[in-house]
Amino acid sequence: MDTRTELLGEIATFQDKLKMADSKIGIIALNDPKFVTRLREGRRCWPETAKKVRDFMAAAYTHITTADGTVIIRDMETGVTASGPSLPEAYAELRRLLERQAA
């Protein structure tokens, strides 16, 4: 099975659980609202891009929203934690922290 087909299956499972639209997944994970639609249309997916989407989906399962609306998200692999006023902003902060750590 190729990367594209595997990723589409993982996205479908994720959407069944979290009820998140294709465009929202693309925006949060890659800043590309048409990513999932293009993937379904047969566009190729690089392994590095698939990793970013998988990382987002894994992190989305490991977030909480506090009473004041702040979203706290944690990367399970590294233990790095970030927060923001929404899931997209918290995830963007997490990505920045992880990139800084890798550099």
Image: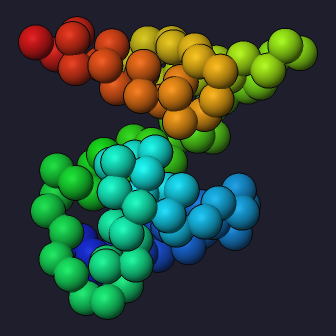
Image-quadrant location for residue 46: bottom left
**Spot occupied by residue 56 in the image (x, y as percentages of width and height):** 45, 43
Above or below, 13 against 90 in this view is below
Which quadrant is home to the N terminus?
Answer: bottom left
Which residue: 42% across, 19% down?
Answer: 93
Q: Residue furthest right?
A: 67
Which quadrant is home to the C terminus?
Answer: top left
Q: Which colouring convention does the figure follow?
A: rainbow
Above or below, 85 against 59 in this view is above
Q: Is residue 99 visible?
A: yes
Q: Is residue 28 found left or right of 64 in the rendered image?
A: left
**Spot occupied by residue 34 in the image (x, y as percentages of width and height):** 37, 69
Q: Residue furthest bottom?
A: 41
- Total labels: the figure holds 0
Which residue: 40% across, 78% down?
Answer: 37
Q: Residue furthest left?
A: 103
Which residue: 52% across, 27% down?
Answer: 89
Q: Is residue 61 found left or right of 4 in the rendered image?
A: right
**Spot occupied by residue 86 in the image (x, y as percentages of width and height):** 64, 29
**Spot occupied by residue 64 in the image (x, y as percentages of width and height):** 73, 25
Image-quadrant location for residue 55: top left
Above or below, 40 against 32 in this view is below
Q: Is residue 23 found left or right of 41 in the rendered image?
A: right
* Depth check, front residue: 89 or 40: 89
Q: Is residue 54 visible?
A: no
Which residue: 60% across, 33% down?
Answer: 87
